[in-house]
Image (tube, rainbow, N blue to C red):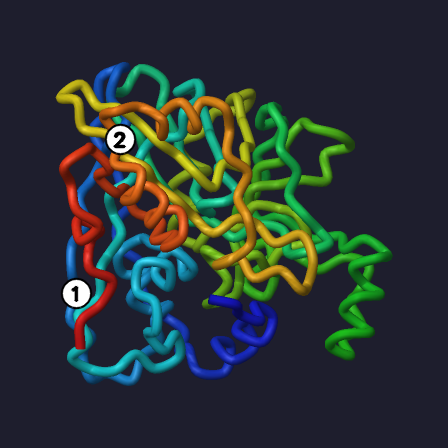
Amino acid sequence: MKLSLPLMGMLFATVFTAGTKASQAADYPLPADNSRLIGENTTYVVPNDGKPLEAIAAKFQIGLIAMLEANPGVDPLLPKPGTVLTIPSQMLLPDTKREGIVINLAELRLYYYPQGESKVVVYPIGIGQLGRNTPEMVTSVSQKIPNPTWTPTPNIRKVYLKEQGITLPGVVPAGPENPMGLFAMRLAAGQGHYLIHGTNANFGIGMRVSSGCIRLRPDDIEALFNSVPKGTRVQVINQPIKFDIEPDGKRYVEVHQPLSRTEKDDPQTMPIAISSSLKKFKSSDETNKDVLTSAIERRSGMPVLVNTGTEETNTPPASAM
C-alpha cells in the first residue's frame, strides 16, 4: 500500500464532516510481566452513511494506517457499504519498560501506563512526516500547556507558503483554529521543540502528517493531558516488528509497515531489518517459519500466531465483501 499522505489529508479535509465523536479511550487490563498480548480484534459492517474510513477509525480508537493495514483494498474515502472490516484492537505491548508514555513510531500508537494502576491506555497518533521525522528518544514531560499558542518556525512558514500558498502569522493564537488543538505537553528533549498535542483537523491521526510532534485526536489529548503528571517519563521507539512467547507457549509476531526513508520507498514492500533476537525466535523448532515469513510480507499490523503446526490462514481476515 503506497499512499500519498498529504494528498489523502487534503481529500479527507474536503469530505470528512466535522463533529465526529471518538469513542472512549482504549483501556486494557495490564497483563502479567511475562505476557504482552492485549485486546481482541472485532469486525464491523460498513453502514451506508457516506462517511470515510477515518470516521470508523475514530469510532473504534484506531489510526487510519492501522485500519488500512488490517483491511487492504478498502477505499479510505468511501468504503463500500456492507463491507466487513477487521477492527485491529489486539496488539502486543512494546518490548520495553512499562512506565509513563511509550510511543512506537512504526505502529503509530502511544501507550500510557498510569502509575499505580494495573492498566495501559492506548491512543492512535500522528507523527512527523517524511523529512520532518519524529526522533527516537527517552525524555519526559517538561511542561503542560492548556490552550496553547503556536509559533511556527521560519522553515515551517516557508513550507506552508511554498506548498499551500498560506502565509502563516508569527504566532497563531489559542483557540479552535489552532493546529495544536486545545492541549499540549512539551517534551524536555533538545530545545523543547517536540510536543504531544491535539489538532484542529479531522484527519491525520494514524498517519505521518506533522512537523515532528506527536498528534492526538481532540478527545484523546484532553484525556491524556488530564491524566499525565508533569515529569512523566516518555520513551519514543521505532519497532515495526514485535514478537512474543506467551505464558501458554503461543508465539506471536506483529508486523507494521516500516517508516519510509525516501519518497520512492513503498512501506508495504521495503525491507525490514531483522534483529538477532528475531532471528533466534524464527530459528526455533517451535516457530512455523513459513507463517512468520508470510506475516512479515503481509504486514497486517495485528498479532499473528506462528507456532509450529499453525497454518498461514490463521491471520485474521482483512475484509470481506
Residue neighbourhood size for the residue with mark 1, other residues' Cα within 10 Å, grouped as few (<14), some (14–19), many (≥20): some
Residue neighbourhood size for the residue with mark 2, other residues' Cα within 10 Å, grouped as few (<14), some (14–19), many (≥20): many
The part of the image, by quadrant, that contains residue 171 is bottom right
Q: Quadrant of the C terminus?
A: bottom left
Q: Which residue is mark 1?
A: 44
Amino acid bearing label 2: Thr
Q: Which residue is mark 2?
A: 287
Q: Is residue 282 left or right of residue 108?
A: left
Give the percent coordinates (x, y) of residue 2. Answer: 52, 68
1 or 2: mark nearer the eye:
2
Give the percent coordinates (x, y) of residue 297. Answer: 40, 52
Q: Is residue 99 above or below residue 258?
A: above
Q: Is residue 93 above or below residue 290?
A: above
Give the percent coordinates (x, y) of residue 226. Answer: 42, 35
Q: Is residue 193 left or right of residue 148?
A: right
Give the percent coordinates (x, y) of residue 234. Answer: 54, 27
Q: Residue at x 79, y 66 (%)?
A: 159
Q: Residue at x 60, y 24 (%)?
A: 138
Q: Is residue 286 above or below residue 207?
A: above
Residues at marks 1 and 2 touching, judged by CB atoms closer than 8 Å: no
Tell me the SS state at disc 1. Answer: strand
Q: Residue at x 34, y 53 (%)?
A: 300
Tell me the SS state at disc 2. Answer: loop
Return the residue nearer the eye: 182 or 153: 153
